[in-house]
């Protein structure tokens, strides 16, 4: 036998033992971490709770951790806020603000309008907070005429700060100063990225918007969408529900909005969607 073959026969077993040693000891700390990917997150805010319209019951008795945005001063506002809180949902106030176009009736009772003085604006926001118990944040219902008005926005946000509420700008106008004033007042805030529905959208439309939301969350790490209960509320619920397997497959978690906003509201936000016994809530 040649010297080369003798050396090869001696070295090869040693190489095999070394490779085996490395594959046994190292994977638990390196290979496992390489295969684990931090999930992206998406928040779904559902506006227009407070009435007894399409989708309200379905959303409240589902296990989808939506953020429940309740319009104040409606027949079911306080009752739905209490129920949503008991069921483990995060609640925000869906504050009605005057739009540039639209019917006054769309705003409901005690909206924020451009003819109000500063103290009346603050009074109405405080009353809204009383009417929607357990609220952790606030977003705007309509409001294209108001969100660009620095005096009124400042009054709204000063009251929000008094009550440690975070703000979501529904982005109904490109002239919005909500973000600017929120930063100035050091209030946690975010801006809506996309809408899931409109007055005419179908279940399939909402499903496609959910897929787009999933893609956006994967691209950015997080994203916020807004949908609605109401006349087309069941289409919104069904479209969202249809897309849940796609979110799971793509490792995108649906979380309450506060999880995507730098806020001290939740010391341990990953356990928010649990009951007092630590079990995840469901139907």
Image (cartoon, rainbow, N blue to C red):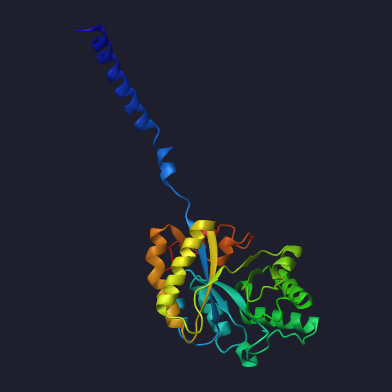
- Examine the image and state in which quarter residue 192 appears: bottom right
Please identify the quadrant where the N terminus is shown: top left
Does residue 42 sit above or below 116 in this rendering? Answer: above
Instruction: From the top left corner, tell me how far across and down residue 93 is, in percent.
Output: 62, 77
Q: Residue furthest left?
A: 1
Q: Quadrant of the C terminus?
A: bottom left
Q: Position of residue 71 (x, y in %)?
A: 60, 82
For the point 62% across and 67% down, which residue is it?
191
Front position in the image: 18 or 124? 18
Q: Residue at x 63, y 59 (%)?
A: 262
Q: Residue at x 31, y 23 (%)?
A: 17
Position of residue 166 relative to residue 16, above or below, is below
Q: Do we see residue 62 in this rendering?
A: no
Left or right of residue 95: residue 1: left
Q: Nearer the viewer, residue 245 or 207?
A: 207
| Residue plotted at (56% across, 57% down) | 268
């Amino acid at each position: 036998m040649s010297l080369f073959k003798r050396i090869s026969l001696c070295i090869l077993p040693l190489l095999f033992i070394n490779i085996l040693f490395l594959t046994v000891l190292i994977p638990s700390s390196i290979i496992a971490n390489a295969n684990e990917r931090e999930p992206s997150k998406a928040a779904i805010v559902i506006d227009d709770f407070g009435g007894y319209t399409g989708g309200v019951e379905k959303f409240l008795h589902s296990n989808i951790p939506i953020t429940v945005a309740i319009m104040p001063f409606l027949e079911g506002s306080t009752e739905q806020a209490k129920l949503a809180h008991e069921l483990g949902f995060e609640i925000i106030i869906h504050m009605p603000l005057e739009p540039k176009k639209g019917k006054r009736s769309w705003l409901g009772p005690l909206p924020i309008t451009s003819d109000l003085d500063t103290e009346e604006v603050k009074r109405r926001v405080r009353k809204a907070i009383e009417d929607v118990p357990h609220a952790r944040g606030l977003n705007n219902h309509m409001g294209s005429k108001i969100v660009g008005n620095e005096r009124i926005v400042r009054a709204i946000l000063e009251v929000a700060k008094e009550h440690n509420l975070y703000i979501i700008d529904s982005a109904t106008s490109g002239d919005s100063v909500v973000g600017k004033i929120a930063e100035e007042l050091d209030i946690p805030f975010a801006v809506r990225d996309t809408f899931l529905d409109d007055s005419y959208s179908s279940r399939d439309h909402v499903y496609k918007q959910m897929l787009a939301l999933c893609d956006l969350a994967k691209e950015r790490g997080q994203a916020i969408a807004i949908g609605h209960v109401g006349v087309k509320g069941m289409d919104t619920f069904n479209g969202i529900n249809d897309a849940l397997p796609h979110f799971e497959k793509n490792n995108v978690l649906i979380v309450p909005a506060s999880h995507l906003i730098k806020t001290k509201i939740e010391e341990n936000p990953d356990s928010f969607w649990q009951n007092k016994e630590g079990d995840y809530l469901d139907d």
